[in-house]
Amino acid sequence: MRQTARGSLRGRGSERWRATRTNSLQPTRRDHIRQGTVRGRGSERWRATRTNSLQPTRRDHIRQGTDGYSGILTTKRRLLKMVVSTLQPLEITEDPNFRDFVKALHPSFSIPSKSTMQSQLLSVYNEMESDLRSKLASADDIVLTCELWSSGAEDSHLTVGCHFVDCNGNLMSYTLKTTSLFRDESAAHIQTQLSAIMDAWQVKEKVHWVVRAGMPQLKNVKAQWGHMPCFADSLNVVFKGLMSDNELSNVVRKSQDIVRFFKKDSEAERKLREIQNGLKFKQDKLILYSGDRWLPSLHMLQRLMEQYPAMMMVFDERGKTDLILNESDKEKIKKIISALEPLREVMSRMKEKGFQSISAVLPLLKILMDSLREEAKCNDVAKTLLLKCKKEFGDVNNNPFLAPIMFLDPRFKNQLGDENKRQAMDKIKTELSAFCSAAELNELVNEYVAYKPNSEESNPLAWWRHTGKEKFGKLSKLGLQKLGVVSTAVPLERAFSSAGDQFCSLRSSIEPENLNMILFLNSNWSSKT
């Protein structure tokens, strides 16, 4: 029944209207909820609803990767990724402090046991291994790198990596296998292990070079693949040769003793900071390094000389006359620092991370030799270092191995001297003679020589994969093969920084049964997956 706007509803309709009208003047359930005044069973339901509203919603669970079974798997996977990326033991999930930390973040999260993590490790390893096998199946040429290292007096290990150029011209690098040598580091045993790894990954026919860190026992071994030393390792070999001089090694040892004194005596270190503050010196942390790598040795000596005036005041006060450097000692340290600076310049020109093509080595060696030659005019330590470099690397102006590789790099091809250029062109023509006539080869190589060089920031592999292939067809495959050889056996961030020492220390503490899988995932598990 309907009335005019001013009329009122009659009968049961009017009662319904009055009830509705009355209720509209009462606080609504929403108002009660706001005021916390819902009564009876409804209030219990409200309190339950209110309590649940404080818990993460389904959407929140999805965002956190904890929605049901798939969410739990995602969380475990992320935890495993943290473990392998930082080389932590799987037992970390059973550590009380770690468990307390996780519970504080998420009280309801069920922390996986070591056995669960072990199962997850195997699952992800199998997944990544299968993915890598498919990538290697499509690769044309593969270069291996191998590093020999020890986890203590008990055992030594061989870690083998692989490198190839993908279809886009990117250099791809992965770890293949870490295997125990059971204290047998002979050339024959290492060769056997390398061959077994190639067979297991079905890449033996594609491997043409193996870049090794150390392992001089492999230098003259005959195999179907060539052996080549790691560039970073070769620089350390040169430094070791320099330190074979007793006078130089003694002054470096004394420098280590000085730093060690302040590291172990907290009162002496406190006094040093007080003096540094008074002299307005930078209070940089002292560096103690007792290994045989040139870069951390350089850092230690430089920091020592920067802080030595303040140190000497502490020695005078404490009566530590045996630690005071005489003028001859200081002069030797300054000469070592100046002699090592050209090596730092070379290192700074390399990429900061990952691996770099061997094509950059010859230009870097030329810079190194020229800088040492100039420094040697007034520095006998630099003169000795120059001689050691010539012995290790040979004549940079007549290098039949590196010259063809540098020639095939469109960034550096015009930087070759006459002798290197002649050797490079002859070698390339010989290698391609089965595919082209002599006339065709001469025309092809001359056209490439005349082509404008690329910028040093460009990617020569991508250039050969696309532009170079289109313009200089038959040179492309050779260019990709030779430029795909890497210059170091380990990533540059480990080869030229203290991060390498930390990595090696952590690596040595991994359980033997998990060593291969954890190092495999540490290298190969992309940050995007």
Image: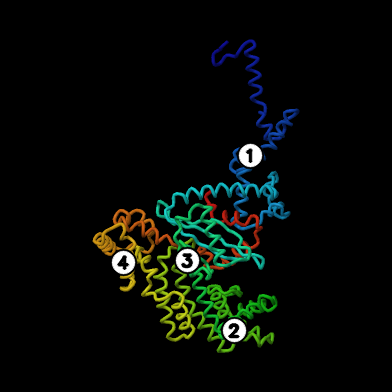
Of badges 4 and 1, the one in the foreground is 4
Lower position in the chain sequence, tag 2 or tag 3: 3
How packed mark 2 is, by other alpha carbons closer than 10 Å (few <14, some 14-19, many 20 or more), is some
Task: Give the residue at mark 4.
Answer: 425
How packed mark 1 is, by other alpha carbons closer than 10 Å (few <14, some 14-19, many 20 or more), is few
Tell me how far mark 3 sits from mark 4, CA to CA: 26 Å
**Residue 329: image x %, image y %?**
57, 86
Q: Is residue 377 above or below residue 28?
A: below
* 397 or 97: nearer the viewer: 397
C-beta proximity under 8 Å, tags 2 and 3: no
* 231 or 505: nearer the viewer: 231
Task: Give the residue at mark 2.
Answer: 250
Task: Give the residue at mark 3.
Answer: 222
Of badges 3 and 1, the one in the foreground is 3
Lower position in the chain sequence, tag 4 or tag 1: 1
Lower position in the chain sequence, tag 3 or tag 4: 3
Lower position in the chain sequence, tag 1 or tag 2: 1
Q: Is residue 191 visible?
A: yes
Q: In this view, which residue lies farthest toward the right?
A: 40
Q: Amino acid at mark 4?
A: Met
Lower position in the chain sequence, tag 3 or tag 1: 1
Q: Is residue 286 visible?
A: no
385 displayed left or right of 422: right
Secondary structure under tag 3 reads loop
Tell me how far mark 2 sits from mark 3, CA to CA: 40 Å
